Image (cartoon, rainbow, N blue to C red):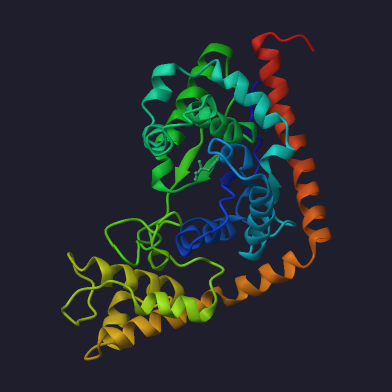
Amino acid sequence: METTQKPERKPVIFSGIQPTGIMTLGNYLGALKQWAMLQDEYDSYYCIVDMHAITIRQDPAAFRKNILSGYALMLACGIDPQRSTTFIQSHVKTHAELAWILNCYTQFGELSRMTQFKDKSQKHPDNINVGLFAYPSLMAADILLYQADLVPVGVDQKQHLELTRDIATRFNSVYGNTFTLPDGYYPKAGAKIMSLQDPTKKMSKSDENVNAFVAILDDQDTIIRKFKRAVTDSEAQVVYREGKDGINNLMSIYSVVTGKTYEEIEKEFDGKGYGDFKLAVGEAVAEHLRPIRENYARYMNDKAYLEECYHKGAEKALKVSQRTLDKVHKKIGFIR
Ligand code: TRP
């Protein structure tokens, strides 16, 4: 029998995040918060993708720190290792193993068309390595190993997800049904957070201007100061309208963290200046992130607990992913 879908099976979610040191408010609202919200409805696998991160040169000491703090931050954001499988990619060998196999079912032309590869090649012209080129087939392996149904990612990853589906479809059509075809789950409007300094650009931790982004772990004063400096317009009217990119961004952030609608926000700040509004947004965001900062500090003070969590996570992930890898080996004719 070739059915992968047992009736009582909860749908599976997989997502990964790179351990880049700083994680922003955008990463939280657009990714980590959603992961936490989805974890009960789905059989969830959440992963720190350290193997993807080495496609760009990393300083070993900083990298080691960032992997651990990335993992701690994931837990601090409410992803519960009791309810989700939380692990570090390089701890689970099946990822590299399946990635190699999928490389042989991925075309050079397909990978050449990936816009992230083109962008990153331009940014790092002295290190256009094969790993950077094959980045999407490792991502496909991450997803397909767990037979994921749903993959929450930013829209910038849409092309990679579509390639994952293409690779899976190709493999399935040659060998019979092997992989579940995953769907992307993209954050809704409001979860796309723009730069505070140039609200036509996405908020990014690699912005050279630190006032352009809010880090999840920024302290209260820093957060408030960054919002006070946010670029808006000269109209002095808190309304959501096309062309008011700065105000729209602040309203959408305020709306997500307070649960208020745009109408309610417009009413609240009717007749008030941007100074009052920016301060209110800054305070609301700082308050919203407070428990995360506190949880993070607690986890970072308990390395033994973190270690226990990522070991258990890796064990479970290996068990599940090995089933898919065994199936793949058999299909392609490897001897057991
Ligand atoms: N490429 C993703 C990003 O940069 C991270 C990632 C790696 C990922 N593997 C994944 C996301 C699998 C979802 C599923 O955001």
Q: Looking at this view, is 104 or 125 the one in front?
A: 125
Percent of width and height locating residue 272: 25, 90
Q: Residue farthest to the bottom?
A: 271
Q: How many marks?
A: 0
Q: Which quarter of the rendering shows the C terminus?
A: top right
Side of 304 where 118 appears, left or right:
left
Percent of width and height locating residue 218: 53, 71
Q: Residue farthest to the front?
A: 126
Q: Looking at this view, is 273 or 326 the one in front?
A: 273
Tell me the quarter of the picture where residue 55 sits.
Answer: top right
Tell me the quarter of the picture where residue 239 sits.
Answer: bottom left
Percent of width and height locating residue 177: 58, 21
Q: Which residue is drawn at 37% across and 63% down?
A: 190
For residue 98, above or below residue 71: above
Asked whether residue 45 is in view, the answer is no
For residue 109, above or below residue 94: above
For residue 101, above or below residue 94: above
Q: Which quarter of the rendering shows the N terminus?
A: top right
For residue 197, above or below residue 135: below
Q: Looking at this view, is 174 or 191 the one in front?
A: 191
Side of 287 where 206 appears, left or right:
left
Percent of width and height locating residue 235: 16, 79
Q: Which residue is drawn at 50% across and 78% down?
A: 286
Side of 273 where 219 appears, left or right:
right
Q: Residue at x 54, y 31 (%)?
A: 140
Side of 331 where 168 appears, left or right:
left
Asked whether residue 304 is in view, the answer is yes
Q: Which residue is drawn at 80% across and 65% down?
A: 302
